[in-house]
């Protein structure tokens, strides 16, 4: 049964008071660096850290009393699972979630803390889904799809109802897409109520579910590849979602992993907000230069989740610094006699850079036993500063052996 605007409005009433109406404030710093008027819809501020609560609450609220007593099961990389666990607990409905082995540890631990039974199974979403289907049959659980069930899509669409009220003269909404449930609900609302507003989908180059579906004119399977945007790694766009969004999305853009890292860094530095990879893709798209038509326009970025593993976050920040030209590494050969390192340090200091780390490699530095390779990790201002530093090193007699 296709989802309608009435279904989404009914879902909004159904979840009112238990799912947060999140802010959608203008970001001055992000507006300055993108050239557009940027508004961030902060659904990472939901109780479980993502927009998935909207659909999960709506779907659980529509179950019969008997279905709630028996419980539900789902396959999820994390956010859908956490949302079901939280709202299942509130509604006294047992929840079992099957998570693929690439699910971030923080999402696994969050689901357990919220009271769900967690089963880690399979190397991708399809294998996790097969196990969840087995449990639905053997245990009598109701399976709740994470992105392709009508009640889920209707719940996710409520975010667009809020956005259109919060930014009444928006020109565009930029939305991540993996399975397509969020995008389908958003596109349906926007094109029904304010069709002039552009709906732009963003996916990682490592996923590409929607691009593949549009090319094939139907949902197709896309092989799993490692990505920071694990929430988009569903292997395929949903059939119901695709039927809703295929004629309602104005444009699809792809962003690289480095662009996602940089967007996460920008959100932390400029908005003081931590987002996960999938939620960073809208900003990554704006920073990538692929949307010049949005300069000067009012653009809403759906910042839809904040559940990133802290261990991964530290690496992402460093990768973002590298992409930004604020962290560089090179190897130079220096004298291993007294004063050799001091001479190198003097050039770096006079260039306005500073050491973050240095390692001496004597075993593989070549035949000169009085020379050593210095592997230097240096903090810089930008890519121009890196080039200036390299020139200063060469001028001072420190030719670069390796530069990255």
Image (spheres, rainbow, N blue to C red):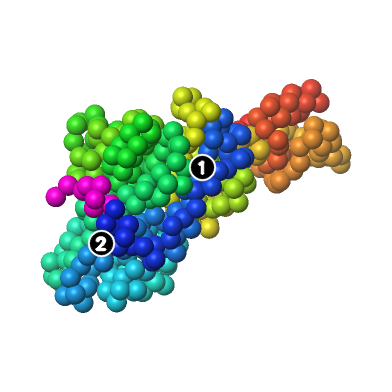
Asked whether residue 205 is drawn in magenta, I would say no
Q: Residue at x 74, y 43 (%)?
A: 355
The answer to whether residue 363 is seen in the rendering is yes
The image quadrant that residue 382 belongs to is top right
Within 10 Å of disc 2 (Cα), the crowding (few <14, some 14-19, many 20+) is: many
Q: Is residue 81 visible?
A: no
Please state which of residues 77 and 40 is positioned toward the viewer in this rendering: 40
Circle 2: element type = helix
User: Which of 356 and 300 lies nearest the eye of the viewer?
Assistant: 300
Residue 114, image x, y percentages: 39, 71
Q: Residue at x 79, y 22 (%)?
A: 395
Left or right: 246 with respect to 198? left
Which stretch is magenta?
A: 1-8
Per the image, the residue denoted by label 1 is 39
Residue 334 vertical placement versus 70 (above, below): above
Give the image location of residue 197, x and y in percent.
38, 34
| Residue matched to label 2 | 59
Image position of 361 (left or right of 317) = right
Position in image of residue 254 (x %, y %): 40, 33
């Amino acid at each position: 049964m296709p989802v309608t605007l009435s279904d989404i409005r009914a879902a909004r009433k159904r979840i009112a008071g238990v799912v947060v109406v999140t802010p959608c404030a203008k970001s001055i710093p992000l507006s300055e660096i993108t050239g557009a008027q940027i508004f961030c819809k902060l659904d990472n501020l939901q109780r479980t850290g993502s927009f998935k609560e909207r659909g999960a609450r709506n779907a659980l609220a529509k179950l019969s009393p008997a279905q709630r007593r028996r419980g539900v099961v789902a396959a999820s990389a994390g956010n859908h699972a956490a949302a079901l666990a939280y709202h299942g607990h509130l509604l006294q409905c047992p929840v079992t979630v099957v998570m693929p082995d690439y699910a971030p540890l923080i999402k696994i631990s969050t689901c357990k803390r919220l009271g769900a039974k967690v089963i880690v199974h399979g190397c991708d979403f399809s294998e996790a889904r097969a196990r969840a289907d087995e449990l639905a049959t053997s245990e009598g659980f109701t399976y709740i799809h994470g992105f392709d069930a009508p009640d889920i899509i209707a719940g996710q669409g409520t975010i667009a109802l809020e956005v259109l009220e919060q930014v009444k003269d928006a020109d565009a909404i930029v939305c991540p897409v993996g399975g397509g449930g969020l995008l389908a609900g958003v596109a349906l609302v926007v094109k029904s109520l304010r069709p002039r507003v552009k709906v732009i989908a963003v996916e990682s180059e490592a996923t590409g579910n929607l691009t593949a579906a549009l090319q094939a004119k139907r949902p197709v399977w896309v092989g799993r590849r490692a990505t920071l945007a694990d929430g988009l790694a569903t292997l395929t766009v949903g059939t119901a979602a695709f039927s809703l969004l295929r004629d309602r999305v104005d444009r699809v853009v792809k962003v690289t992993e480095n662009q996602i890292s940089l967007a996460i860094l920008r959100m932390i530095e400029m908005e003081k907000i931590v987002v996960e990879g999938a939620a960073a893709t809208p900003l990554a798209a704006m920073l990538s230069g692929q949307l010049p038509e949005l300069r000067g326009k009012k653009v809403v970025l759906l910042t839809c989740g904040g559940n990133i593993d802290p261990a991964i976050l530290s690496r992402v920040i460093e990768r973002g610094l590298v992409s930004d030209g604020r962290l560089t590494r090179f190897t130079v050969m220096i004298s291993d006699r007294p004063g050799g390192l001091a001479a190198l340090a003097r050039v770096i200091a006079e260039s306005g850079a500073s050491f973050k780390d240095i390692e001496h490699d004597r075993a593989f530095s070549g035949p000169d036993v009085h020379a050593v390779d210095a592997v230097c990790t240096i903090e810089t201002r930008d890519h121009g500063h890196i080039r200036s530093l390299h020139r200063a090193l060469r001028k001072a007699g420190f030719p670069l052996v390796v530069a990255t």
